[in-house]
Amino acid sequence: MKIVVAIKQVPDRDAPVRIAPGGKWIDETDLQWAMNEPDAYALEEALQLKEKNGGEVVALSAGPERTGQTIREALAKGADRAIQVVCDDLGTRDALGVAKLLAAAIKPENPDLVLTGLQSEDIGLGQTGVIAAELLGLPHATLILHVEKTDAGVTVKRELEEGWFQSIEMPLPAVLTMQSGGTKLRYATLMGIKRAKTKELKSVTAAELGADAAPVVVLEQIALPKKQKSTQILPGSPKEAAAALIEKLKTEARVL
Amino acid sequence: MMASLPTLAEPRHFAIWESALFAALIVASVWAFWRPFGTILRKILASKSDADFHLFPIGRRIRDFVWEVMLQAKVIRERPLPGLAHAFVFWAFCAFALVTLNHCATAFGAAFLDPAEPVSRIYYYIAAVFAAACAIGIFGLFVRRFFARPKWLGELSWGSGLVALLIFLLMVTYLAAFFVQPDSLAARALWWAHTLTLLAFLPVIPHTKHLHLVLSPFTIFLSRGGFSRIPPLSGDEDFGLVAGKDLTRLASLQAYSCVECGRCTEHCPANNTGKLLNPKQIVLGLRGYLNEYSPASEEPLLGKYNAQEAAFQCTTCGACEFQCPVGIEHLPIIIGLRRGAVNTGAWEDDYGAKLFLALERGSNALGMSATERDKFVEKNTLPIFDGTQEYCLWLGCMGAYDPRGREIVLALVRVMRHLGASFGVLRKEKCTGDPVRRLGNDLVFQQLAEANLESMAQNKVKKIVSICPHCVRTIQEDWKEFGAPPAVEHHSEFLARFASQLQPVQDQKRIVFHDPCYLGRYRGVYDQPRQVAALAGDLVEAPRSRERSFCCGAGGGLSFLGEEKGDRVSHVRAAELAATGANVVAAACPFCNTMFQDAFAARGEGAPELMDIAQLVARGLPE
């Protein structure tokens, strides 16, 4: 079973995020970068499938030079080889633009399965994997927690709302977008890092892939969430106030 | 006066056949000794060389040799009575060197000592005194091993009984020769009895723990020194102790030197609370492995002879290594086994993986967001270190993120402000890497150490003070592998230096101080925290204190690994501290503090108050 895992490098959760001048993207100087968490789960699922069924895991990532660090992390954790699509404009590409890059890189690989995170931790569009599936002409399923290989294809466990799960049987090849938390992540090891140095890392550019599409959706402006705290005093007798509070919790806060 | 004393009787003349027989027996005995001993020696020498071994400076080695081998100080200090008995056996063996040589030489007419000549005579008497002491000593040890039977000695062994008998016979046959006529049949019989005992003794050595007779002087002389010195990994294929091929000569030598006295196990907090770990068995496990496989073997070390579970139950408190009388360095071995398991990914543990992932990506072992530290620094208006202040106050994970650790930091800050000491905290800190270092994750440790060393250089840090003995140890010793760390001290050392400027607190508290392993055994700091704690009341001592302090259970990364098997180490120690009748337990380590906090909470009513020494003295400051 040949599995391609599409991975994005995102700002580390602890990194201080600032808006870049112009307000169209974040200021990338002084940021620490890390592997997008749902993608880390996609990689883990792929490695476990390989350990059980044999085959090959190929890590794929699009982004500037610094993405190499995250790719090496994927190789260290157990991916067999990697493809880096070098492009410096990832931030300004829309989901279609990124999906085109990924699909173009995946196509010649002819994988049995493509796994990626259900969304990125930075912009969180949640569309890239699905669009890539369309471009590749493959069936897909989203929000997957677990994948089991069967004779006919795969059985996947899909997360629904309110604690429900759905079990789906799918043919291969297919694209799955993975939810975080379905399994336990492995830690990086010294041996993994040393072995990663000898693994193949193929580098291609967006132009070489012929996927240099102009964006359909343009990002106008980004802003940090406003910190605000507002206090409301509900008037009336305790009974009236309690009734009003319940109403607000139901309709405004929607927690009841 | 000497004339009235008996003289040692020896046969003067030997028939040729007698000399020939004796020579043949010597050859047989040496051959029977050398066959197994040579195999062991070859295994040790075939092991990988120790990349970080340096014979020099040799002064420390000579000092250790004189103190631990010649004077038997470590043997005696730990177990005074059996220790003395052992020392007399050892000293008698030394005193007997010339006697034995002369004894053998006699058979070939080459005797160089003459019982009638005064100097030889005095020497014989000195040897006789030692022989008597040795006979009593070995008899005492025999009684202890076969009748008193302390459990740390393990199961009865025929070898020990046989050796005790042989040593006893050696001494008795020597002493008896003072009471028979020279050149009599009795003298000849005693000579032969003594000689045969000696020749029988030699081949027993390599088959029993008495191998330590031959090896341990070398083990002590060649030991790495320091305490828990973890050797650097050498080359791209070294991941720690994975298989036989990774055992170094020092590790193999130590494995064969174990005398099975069980002092390590007696003091081991894991073993004493019902866990699988037995430090003696770790060492004997390596010996068993070496006996079965070759030092070039690919067979995993954690398997038939040693269990992975045991290796990961160690709190790295170092009581074992501190006690060992034959120079075995348990911590580099146990941590080496962990390195082998973690660096290759063989160790699978949910808590461990969580800790490693937290430190791969984040800044602290508690898995908190770094902004929590920023908020703490901001809220308490802690000055930021800018290179102009004298001290860099290192918060550490506990000091920056743990509520109790933060209280200790704030108490120390109050004292430092009162003393007018200039200090600042770094804008950003990463974990020193202590838990990953002890758990054997070299990848994350190296990343953390390098990032921190770079930050130290950038911020021009010269002097660090920290509330955490683990941070202090890791900064001072473990970072050395990747650069030159700044000077660092524990806050107990800082506070003790300024003790005269601090107000005593007069409220009649009875205080028991708990020695943190990483401050005491690791750093040799025992008096300073007591001096500081004494400002706040009367000190009482726990039954196990100073060098023999009993761990709180947190070290070695274990505070991050979830529930323990058996009793909790912290509960055992907390009960011991409470039983001293003290109304305050003084701690000097945020990990000890948090462990005892939980333990006392579990005890409920009547638990003593728990405070760090910084909090104790901060109480005496004007508001």
Image: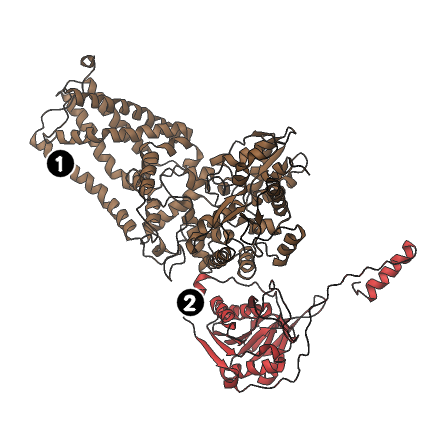
Chain colours: A red, B brown
> Looking at the picture, how far across and down is residue B174, in whole percent?
22, 24
Query: Chain letter of disc 1?
Result: B
Q: Using the image, determine if residue B402 lies above or below residue B141.
A: below
Question: What's the residue at 65%, 55% (across, down)?
Answer: B375
Which residue is more in the foreground, B340 or A73? Answer: A73
Query: Chain letter of disc 2?
Result: A
Instruction: Give amino acid for label 1.
Output: Ala
Q: Using the image, determine if residue B412 lies above or below residue A98.
A: above
Estimate how packed mark 1 is, as few (under 14), some (14 to 19) or many (20 or more) residues with alpha carbons within 10 Å.
some
Which residue is more in the foreground, A70 or B133? Answer: A70
Q: Using the image, determine if residue A169 lies above or below residue B318.
A: below
Left or right for B198, reference A32: left
Question: What's the residue at 53%, 79% (across, down)?
Answer: A87
Q: Which mark is residue B23?
A: 1
Question: Residue beneath label 2, please?
Answer: A195
Left or right for B348, reference A255: left
Q: Which mark is residue B551?
A: none
Question: Do labels 1 and 2 touch, CB within 8 Å?
Answer: no
Question: What's the residue at 17%, 37% (across, down)?
Answer: B26
Instruction: Give amino acid for label 2.
Output: Arg
Q: Using the image, determine if residue B433 lies above or below residue B514.
A: below
Q: Nearer the viewer, mark 1 or mark 2?
A: 2
Question: What's the residue at 25%, 35% (across, down)?
Answer: B201
Indicate the secondary structure of the residue bearing disc 1.
helix
The N terminus of chain B lies in quadrant: top left
> Looking at the picture, how far across and down is residue B222, in whole percent?
32, 44
User: In which quarter of the view is residue A39 placed?
Assistant: bottom right
Estimate how packed mark 2 is, as few (under 14), some (14 to 19) or many (20 or more) residues with alpha carbons within 10 Å.
some
> Looking at the picture, how far across and down is residue A37, in whole percent?
59, 67
Discs 1 and 2 carry the same chain letter? no
The C terminus of chain B lies in quadrant: top right
Q: How many marks?
A: 2
